[in-house]
Image (spheres, coloured by chain):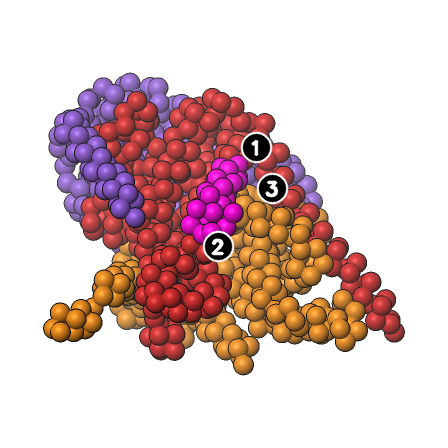
Amino acid sequence: MDSIRESLLKKSKATKKDRFARVITFSALLLIVVVVISIFLFVASKGLATFFTNKVNLWDFLSGKKWAPGQTNAQGQPLTGALPMITGSFLVTLIAALVATPFAIGTAVFMTEISPKHGAKILGPVTELLVGIPSVVYGFIGLSVIVPVMRHIFGGSGFGIIAGAMVLFIMILPTVTSMTVDTLKSVPRHYRESALALGATRWQMIYKVILRSATPGILTAVVFGMARAFGEALAVQMVIGNAPLMPKGLTSPSSTLTSILTQGIGNTVMGSLENNALWSLALILLLMSLVFNIIMRAIAKKGAM
Amino acid sequence: MKRNWLISAAIVIVAVCLLTFGYATRQKDNGVNITAVGSTALQPLVEAAGEDFASENKGVYVNVQGGGTGTGLAQIQSGAVDLGNSDMFAGEKDAINDKKLVDHKVSVVGISPMINKEAQVDHLTKQQLIAIFTKKVTNWRQVGGADLPIILINRVTGSGTRATFEKWGLDGAKSADSQEQESSGTVQSMVSSTPGAISYASFGYLNDSVVAPKIDGVTPTNEHVISGKWPIWSYEHIYTNGQPTGEVKQFLAYIDSKHIQKTLVPKLGYISVHDMKVSRDENGKLSTVD
Amino acid sequence: MLNPKQSDKLASIILYTIAGLVILILAALVGYILVQGVPHLSWHFLTSSSSAFTAGGGIGVQLFNSFYLLIITMLISFPIALGAGVYLHEYANQKSRLIQLIRTAIEILSSLPSVVVGLFGFLLFVVQFKLGFSILSGAIALTFFNLPLLTRSVEESLRSIPDLQREAGAALGLSRWETVGHIILPAAVPSIVTGVVLSAGRVFGEAAALIYTAGQSAPALDFGDWNPFNTASPLNIMRPAETLAVHIWKVNSEGIMPDAAAVSAGASAVLIIAVLLFNFFARFLSNVLYKRLTATK
């Protein structure tokens, strides 16, 4: 009697294994969380030092227009105005996303609704290939192809926000497109069939049914591409002109948060104000990607109704 | 299922055996590692000298990394590395306490303005140069060239090349806000491809694709740097934390030896410290060497 | 006003144009890199070691380093990402606030500029833990940078397996782990492999995170010595290792060799070809695995 009872109440081997697997997988997740938290703390401690140790006014930092942390203004305050870079980052990101969206949607629709066979064969491998190209190479192509073209069209030096946005456009296009393709694919088949059964043309079906129901997914893809663009450094740095000035127009040299951060960090001394100010830029980047993330989540939630 | 387990166990056992065998038979002279970090401009020289040094001294490895002058000075100050490569005097960086650091000047590098060919300018006065970099002059026509707007390209704030150029080329004037680039190679290719662009770089980057103008009638050549006629030059420094000892000392002596100074240094576009007829101290005081 | 038929035609034309344009742009990009680079390729270029200031240097060591670093990085990051992805999708309570927070944190990490990750790795591993400029430091830094992407793609792959499969497993009396191990993961292999290939591409092309961790010097290797504890051995994980992408960056920014442009173009082409070969190889492997693990013929 007892042995039966025991064997019934005892945890089975499968349960034990399951428990074990649960612990293992959970510790993997925990490890990632520790990594994330340590990086956050690291960037925050360095980035906040500008405000606490070096006593820079937060508002001056965000709204100041002159970036020269090594120099001081008339009041003896260091010149740490990050507004030009913040503006530059937003402008290139927005323009790149604005240009990329119609292209991405068009290509994705073509590849899922019009010619699925060719779509899968061409786009997949090309996307995977393009992520592997180092951003230096993108930057170099930008320098030797895009900048001269811009100079030809708009005059001036050719370096500027437009050139930066074009390079980013090419860089994020594959990502946004392949994410849009995934969304379009997840639109249930019976939507398409119902629309066609009602006598809709292919375009009406695409426009009135598929794109409508895929809108949240497409928006997520675009915001994801924007987050990518926001964090990209080396390629933009080579074509945007990299001048820490308020952008006067779309074709005048300006700079982004990442470009100033990347090129300055090796030339400043750890712990100095110049260095801390750069970490503050990194902190802004981190917070911005948080914002992008929240936007994505909000869109996904709305779409999930 | 059983068989799979056996196979995996066998693989693990074989791998462990191989590793143990490898560990037991490793070369015992893994010896000394000298790590140098800092200026990317100095990296090729130290790297090449390090390879020669390692081949002559068994068991010593010289590990040379870039990372920038700021990183090099910060790391040598904190004692994390053996050698800190720098384009400028440690005292010129505010955040560096140079009391403990020992300076070893390993070579001299000349820096020259470079101008895009389409500007059609091949000589400038120093006043004109200063006027261009402070944006008092904005068209090449004003200094005798083509009718083309001037496009300034600077190296990034904090770079040794920029500091030297502003101090000796612009007589201490700060360059106006403009484009900034991180590296000499990028600057060089930008100047050669952008009509009307002007920037500066060390002599090693000058070639036929850009114009290196005469300043006040002096051409930017090694001879003029050596004689002190060409004012824009700086030392390349290797810093140690405290007086060097042992292999580090030997290595620094090796870099300073005739062998390196006569062969590698000129090949890389640098000038040997021993050839200089003038010398300069941290505050910029010039004196002649006999 | 166009009637529906006409607008359908017009839309089709526009869509064809856009798709054609995009393919043209991307093809031109790849073509440009290949056309610029391929003429510089030679057996000598692929096998000899690089030179700092004379012409005729190769990329042999860098090419090996890239692959080796990629393998080490994957060995570290794939098990962690797989575990975390499985927990997130199969075990975790999806409605829990904490899990939501963790997801957000992971995604933010993925959009951090790589130079920040590189500097973090430099201060922590290279300096604090005294690992020095080494393949190990580089692999850990790349793991940081790789984990969010990989975890996300594992999770997405698991999500794409219909719940029907899980219910079937449960109905057969399998524990959750048995269901995951025997049904879900095998079915998800192809899409997990796609994720791995994508992140491998990024690892291959990454430069900024490695400059401060794996270093930017490539000491000559002794390819006859495969003992991982010897300094000159290619397998040693404590040696500094400049990868192909870092080499391209260095040549472009500071290179003073007379053939810098050619080296950079050739190396870029090699990088693309390497990524391409890697993709083919991974696809092949995933097909074999998929066939062996599932009942597909």
* Secondary structure mostly taken by the magenta-highlighted segment of the chain: helix
Quickly name the residue at label 3: C30
Distance in Å between CA atoms under marks 2 and 3: 25 Å
Numbered mark located on residue C160 in the image: none
In the image, the segment drawn in magenta is C271-297
Say what amino acid the circle numbered 2 marks: Ser
Res A46 quadrant in image: bottom left
Nearest-to-viewer mark from 2 and 3: 2
Give the chain letter for red: C
At 66% across and 72% down in the image, what residue appears?
A: A191
Distance in Å between CA atoms under marks 1 and 2: 32 Å
Residues tagged by mark 2 and mark 3 found on one chain of the structure = yes
Image coords of residue A10 (percent x, y): 18, 69
Q: Which of A204 and C190 is in front in this view?
A: C190
Q: Which of B286 and B90 is in front in this view?
A: B90
At 82% across and 63% down in the image, what residue appears?
A: C10
Quickly name the residue at label 1: C37
Give the chain letter for purple: B
- Side of C110 relative to A133 (left or right): left
